[in-house]
Image (cartoon, rainbow, N blue to C red):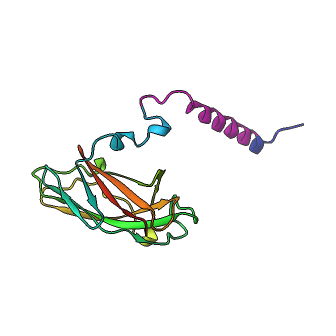
Amino acid sequence: MAITQTRKVAIALTIAALALTGCSKGSTNGNAAPDQSSSLTETKAPSATIDFGGDQTLKTGVVITVTDPVSFTPGQFASNYVKTQVANKFDVTINNGGTTDVDMTTVTILSKSGSNNCVDVLDGDSGIIGAPTDPLAAGATATFSYGIACDAKVGDPLNISISVGADVINVDGKLN
């Protein structure tokens, strides 16, 4: 029985995929274990806790403002969204009132509802494309929409943790 060239390629790709899958099971090589993926920002004591709709000025002069979350329906091409989840979006404004650039690649946002972690949703059709990554110059302002989806119900607690450099701001409210 002869094996066709197409079949040989398919078998080789299957073996390669299985080998690569097995590679990730051993060591974390210094990366956080899956159950510790958010420990870098959650274990640090917050610099401040604010409500949605409020703002916080950091010691560096940077001002963080977070609008009230609003319900939205992610489009068909949205990432990470499952139809049984509650989706909310809010705007984050970072005003750099400091004297040095803010490295926007260090800005992280984690969200949860009660004991359930929420997932980030990217949805270009709804204008949710993630945080900017270019440095934010002193005196400049950046505003971006941020989307999340939670395994929760409307009215359940919503807690956001925003890390900007060494500062962590907690934002508390409810899912809409």
x%, y% of residue 5?
76, 42
What residue sits 53% from the left and 66% below the top?
77
For this orientation, the residue located farthest to the right is 1
Residue sticking out furthest to the left: 99
Q: Quadrant of residue 61?
A: bottom left
Q: How many marks?
A: 0
Q: Residue at x 75, y 45 (%)?
A: 6
Q: For the C terminus, which image quadrant?
A: bottom left
Left or right of residue 35: residue 91: left
Query: Relative to the observer, which residue lies in front, 113 or 148?
Result: 113
Q: Is residue 65 left or right of residue 175?
A: left
Give the vertical position of 61 relative to 54 (above or below).
Answer: above
**Residue 20 part of the magenta-drawn span:** yes
> Where the N terminus falls, by quadrant?
top right
Give coordinates of residue 106: x percent, y percent: 29, 47
- Front residue of 104/157: it is 157
Residue 110 magenta: no
Quarter-wise, where is residue 91 in the image? bottom left
* Position above or below: 49 against 144: above
Q: Which residues are magenta?
A: 8-30
Q: Is residue 128 above or below residue 61?
A: below
The residue nearer to you, when weighing 72 against 170, is: 170
Q: Relative to 31, is 42 above or below?
A: below
Looking at the magenta stretch, what is its main secondary structure? helix
Image spot of residue 29 (x, y percent): 45, 28
Seen at 24% across and 49% down, the residue is 103
Please report the residue visible at 55 percent of the width from the left and 33 percent of the height from the top. Answer: 24
In the figure, is residue 172 to the left or right of 32?
left
On the image, the x and y values in percent for residue 140 come to 16, 61
